Amino acid sequence: MLKIDRSALLFSVNCFTASVMALGIGFWLDLSRPYWSVLTVYIVSQPLAGAVRSKAIFRVIGTLLGAAFAVFTVPVLVNSPPLLSLALASWLGICLFISLLDRTPRAYVVMLAGYTAALIAFPTVNNPAQIFDVAVSRVEEIVLGILCATITHSLFFPRPVGFVLRQRLRSWLVDGDGWALDLLRGKEAAHSFDDRRHLAAAATEIHLLSVLLPFDTSSMRDTVGVVRAMHQRLMVLIPILSSVADRLIALNDNLAPIRAEVNDVADWIAQGADQGKMSALTERLMRAKTANMGCDWASLLRESLLERLMDLVGNLGQAHALLLHLERPDDGISEDLATAVATQQSRPLHRDVGMAAISGLSAFLSILIVCTVWIVTGWPEGGVAAALAGVFCALFAALDDPAPAIIGFGVFNGLALPVAALYQFAILPMIDGFPMLALVLAPPCCWPGPPWWNDGPPCLLWRSCWA
């Protein structure tokens, strides 16, 4: 029996509802190409409501900037195709470079400005007199799709960022507790590297989700300070646990004098890391540290291990207290934690200038190569190919290796062609009226796919653009 993920199905239905709304409004407004609104819905839709809402206004601004650049550039450079190609390729490359340096939702302003200019300018070079009308039409259609997607995902079965974030925080803390218990009970070694990598990746995901929290539909949008404070403590746990592991390995058979304290910390973690017992445990560790002071190497290692265990107890206890406060806001937190939450600031992310430069240069060269083939061969649809090259480079640039995703796009595009051909030549010519059009499009658009195929947007025909 085929099992369908309920959340994936609801997301599929939401996307289809937004696309039908955009298509219907596009027909009603007599837009030149209302299907652009449908494509925009599937591009901007995300499973989390906050992700759609956070980027909506930035996408609109970016679309307007890209359209303005296209309107300014095409009439001036249309008689010199190489210069026009160079200008548009440079624009997209620079915009992509800037967007990758700003790892927040506002990066979509410059990203959309980059590839919207390519989408508008390249297909209209053969008819430059229409550039303003085309730009206005594309902006109307794209903005319509953005608004319909934002409204639908915010009102109908929204999946709040806060709910997912709380799950991630709870799961992260459970994994952190498990790693600490394995260390303290002598089960460490084999999975150490995998544990560290998994926790580091999860911590990055938590940070990205917390950026979306102010735009969320849940009550957790007012708890950004608590989430940031907890995330800070979780991030510190990774080097603390790594240092504890190193000292335990170095001590080996010289751990006996403080084995009881190590077991006490393990028991405290296993019982839920109660902050009420944290002070007493920390005091015991401090007394053991004083008692084990010495000049020999083993004593220094034991002293250092006890210091790290105190750090571990402090961070784990506070992290558990903050998670409990997130789940039960009416329960208060200690005064020092309340002060930390009130003064919490957003943590700046690392900027990989080299990676951003390579991505921008790749987009620049890709467009130039396609434009060269277009100009030399006189390819009638070369403008569309150049525009799509820019879109692919922009959408997949944030991936460590964009090539597999772009190849997957081509593969699934080929697999979707028979379905599209069936609709184009057999089904659509037989229908009449918008209600019937929406009805026949519902099956492929609402089916979320098998469980292993739920990583992208729901529309079967659109899978080719997301694989």
Image: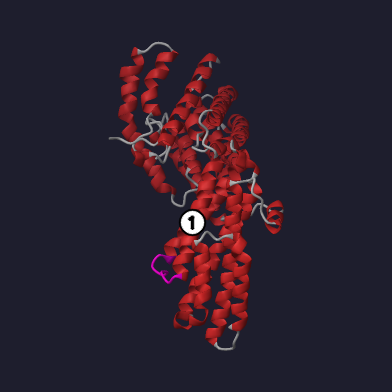
Quadrant location, the C terminus: top left
On whether residue 176 falls in the magenta region, the answer is no
Closer to us: 173 or 452: 173
In the rendered view, tell whether residue 357 sits above or below residue 370.
Answer: below
Quadrant location, the N terminus: top left
* Circle 1 crowding by C-alpha within 10 Å: few under 14, some 14–19, many from 20: some
Taking the image as drawn, is residue 192 in sight?
A: yes
Seen from this angle, which residue lies furthest top? 432
Q: Residue at x 50, y 31 (%)?
A: 157
- Pointer 1: what residue? 174
Instruction: Name the image quarter holding residue 146.
Output: top right
Q: Residue at x 47, y 24 (%)?
A: 17
In the rendered view, tell whether residue 265 sits above or below residue 374.
Answer: below
Closer to us: 342 or 260: 260
Closer to us: 191 or 285: 285
Start and end of the magenta stretch? 185-192
Q: Residue at x 59, y 78 (%)?
A: 288
Instruction: Name the image quarter holding residue 111.
Output: top right
Q: Secondary structure at mark 1?
A: helix
Q: Residue at x 57, y 71 (%)?
A: 308
Taking the image as drawn, is residue 80 in sight?
A: no
Give x and y (percent) for residue 435. 43, 14
The secondary structure that most of the magenta stretch takes on is loop
Closer to us: 377 or 61: 61
In the rendered view, tell whether residue 302 sits above or below residue 265.
Answer: below
